[in-house]
Image: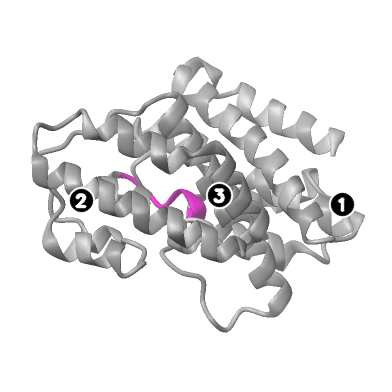
Amino acid sequence: MEEALTEFKSFTNDYLEYGEMITLKINHTLRVVELCENIAKSLNLNDEEIFIAKIIGLLHDIGRFEQWKVYKTYKDIDSIDHANLGVEILKKNNYLRKFIKDDKYDDIILKSIYYHNKHTIPSDLDEKTTMFAKLIRDADKIDILYIYTIKQIDLPLDNEFTNDTYESLLKENTISREDIKTKTDRLAITFGFIFDINYKYSFEYLKDKKYFDTIVDIYKEKLNNEVFRNQLEEIRKIINNYIEVKIC
């Protein structure tokens, strides 16, 4: 793992000149590695599998750095799918070998990275690949929620959630980009993260950190709209109940 971290540092050093958004993504990656390790241990995976989980965490956003360099945005919809780009980078000149010598996990690693940002995971993946894909999705979402609360990323709002988006959350559904009709609806994607969380450790972690409560409290003060505030409180109840059920 030390060799993989050294290679990651060497890779990202070439992008540091592009500013603090690069540093933000490096720090995100390192936190995701730790989360991947903790989730893997909670699943009683063996040492080799824990290592694979950490490698996936380390490489899941490797496409982000070139994305920022070229497009100056992390919005895939305005630039390029960063997971697809990451897979291309790792395949080019067999770059993945710089991080892991053995190739027997290549398919799992590349598919987990490819699907970590997609709306859903295909149902035809084999059991082990599905497990690792779910693991990185959990770790990634947990740290995105951390960034939203600690950094208090300020999403612009324009009104309350649209009816379709709000009803989707009440029905415990994730929100896709195609569902977004307004600026406020973008916030719904973040709340919908909880309905794509998979493992008990992740639910217990989110309960302990109270990220969703914090996000509700932050955004209740962003818009002078009673309907929106009531929607947020109802979403809070739905999410907290969902977490409790999944933990039990």
Tell me: residue 154, above or below residue 105. Answer: above
Q: Position of residue 41 (x, y in %)?
A: 81, 53
Total tally of numbered discs in the picture? 3
Residue tagged by mark 1? 101
How far separated are the C-alphas under marks 3 and 2?
37 Å
For the residue carrying disc 2, how many other residues have a C-alpha within 10 Å: few (<14), some (14-19), or many (20+)? some
The image quarter in which residue 177 lies: bottom left
Callout 3: helix, strand or loop? helix
Q: Position of residue 165 (x, y in %)?
A: 21, 61
Q: Is residue 54 left or right of residue 171?
A: right
Q: In this picture, is 240 found above or below 108?
A: above
Figure quadrant of the C terminus: bottom right
Magenta includes 184?
no
In terms of image quadrants, where is residue 79?
Answer: top left
- Name the amino acid type tagged 2: Gln
Q: Which residues are magenta?
A: 79-84
